[in-house]
Image (cartoon, rainbow, N blue to C red):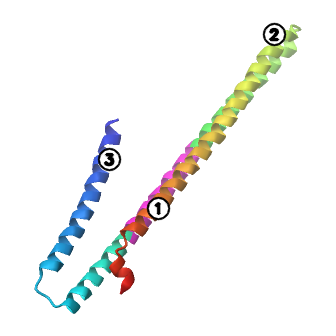
Amino acid sequence: MSKEINEINTKDFIIGTLIGGIIGATTALFLAPKSGRELRGDISTQASTVAEKTNKLTSGALEKGGEWANIAKDRTSSLTQTVTEQSSQLMNKVRDIRKSNNDSDSVNDEISAVDELAEEARNSENSSLQSQEEVISSQADQTSEEKKETVPESANQS
């Protein structure tokens, strides 16, 4: 919980700093005693600078997102492997018990229960991977949309 609050505060601080910097730079440009042509040139230069910084931040965020996705996939695959190994061991034990006992009804019930647990583990792993991929995809889409919104219109006109 504390980590989430800290991340939100850090994000808010960075966003506030960027917005404050943009507003401050724009105010300084408009209050400076310059001709219209010089002012438009300065605005165009500032817009280009902001666009370059935004591109750098976006690419950095995408790289980190990719790294986090790889880490999540690695951890999920190791968890899947562990679950698969344990369910195989459990299945082997149940089969051994089945061979040694003639009471097949209760053993069959146990085998069915183990099969259901193994299937649930596989389904859980698949849904976990899908949800991670959806989160990563939505973060990439959101970053792309934010990037489009941050490029000033004056940069597109010059």
Q: Decide which of 79, 143 is in the foreground and name it.
A: 143
Q: Is residue 91 in view from this perspective?
A: yes
Does the segment drawn in magenta span residue 78? no
Could you tell me how far apart the alpha carbons at marks 2 and 1 are, in whole angstroms? 54 Å
Which residue is under mark 1? 62
Q: Where 43 sits versus 83, above or below?
A: below
How far across and down, in percent of the image, does residue 156 sit?
A: 39, 81
Q: Alpha-carbon neighbours of circle 2 within 10 Å: few (<14), some, or many (≥20)?
A: few
Kindly indicate the quadrant of the structure image that contains residue 143: bottom left
Q: Decide which of 101, 147 is in the foreground and name it.
A: 147
The residue at the point 23 percent across, 61 percent down is 17
Main secondary structure of the magenta stretch: helix
Q: Which of the labelled discs sits on residue 8, or is there none?
A: 3
Write the start and end of the magenta stretch as one range: 55-75
Name the kind of residue labelled 2 in the image: Ser
Q: Which of the labelled discs sits on residue 106, or is there none?
A: 2
How far across and down, in percent of the image, does residue 92 sit?
A: 78, 24
Answer left or right for 4 relative to 131: left
Closer to the chain start, of discs 2 and 3, is 3
Q: Residue furthest toward the top?
A: 103
